[in-house]
Amino acid sequence: MPMSQKQIREHIFAVVINKVEEQDEGKRQEALSEFMAITGTAGNASNKVAELIPPIMHELYEKWITMFIDRLLETVDTQNIELLCDGLPDNNAALVLAYIMFLESARMEKQIEEDLKQHGLATSEDNDLGDVAANYIRSQMAKIAEDASDDKIKGNA
């Protein structure tokens, strides 16, 4: 039985948001600490960045995922999308990878930068903390893509 567009949207949204937000607070803090160590950011910057990221991230992820779903439905035949919405691990990983590829498009790079600036995570000389937060967001998206790719290879997305 064919899925409705609403069912397709809900499925894709759930798959992507679950992958993007699967980290618990402890893992998030650990990732922030590792990122700060790699970038040479000292002091309590990770705590300040951590305060900035949680409410912003969910709102932005929702926006970007919705934009992804809209674009996917505009450009790909619904029957083909439906094949990816069967809940199988490989297809869930494929959806996450398609989302990450969408985020890496020139259009979305510009959109992401605009959204980060709107939420006080601008990347200007006067906003070092914003640079750190924006770079952290980008590094986490790259890690999610890597994890999804690994899951697809292993067959357990």
Image: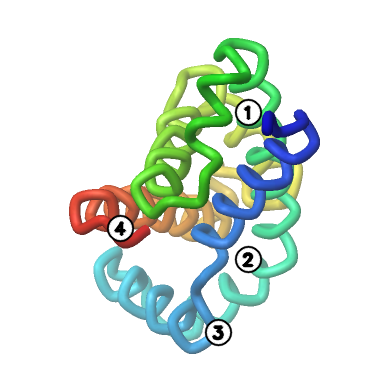
Q: Is mark 2 on a helix, strand or loop?
A: helix
Instruction: Please tell me how crowded label 2 is: few (under 14), some (14-19), or many (20+) other residues with Cα within 10 Å.
Output: some
Which residue lies under the disc numbered 2?
53
Number of labelled discs? 4
**Which mark sits nearer the N-terminus, 2 or 4?**
2
Residue 146 place in picture, x, y as percent = 27, 52
Left or right: where 29 falls relative to 38: right
In front of the other: 9 or 70: 9
- Residue at (68% x, 29% y) in the render: 2
In front of the other: 10 or 19: 10
Q: What residue type is labelled 4?
A: Asp
Left or right: where 35 falls relative to 57: left
- Residue at (67% x, 69% y) in the render: 54
| CA gap, disc 2 and disc 3 | 12 Å
Q: In which quarter of the image is the N terminus?
A: top right
Q: Which amino acid does label 3 sit on?
A: Glu
In front of the other: 144 or 41: 144
| CA gap, disc 4 and disc 1 | 24 Å
Task: Tell me the number on the disc at residue 111.
Answer: 1
| CA gap, disc 3 and disc 4 | 18 Å
Instruction: Please tell me how crowded label 1 is: few (under 14), some (14-19), or many (20+) other residues with Cα within 10 Å.
Output: some
Left or right: where 46 falls relative to 18: left
Looking at the rendered image, the disc whose residue lies closer to the viewer, 3 or 1, is 3
Which residue lies under the disc numbered 4?
147
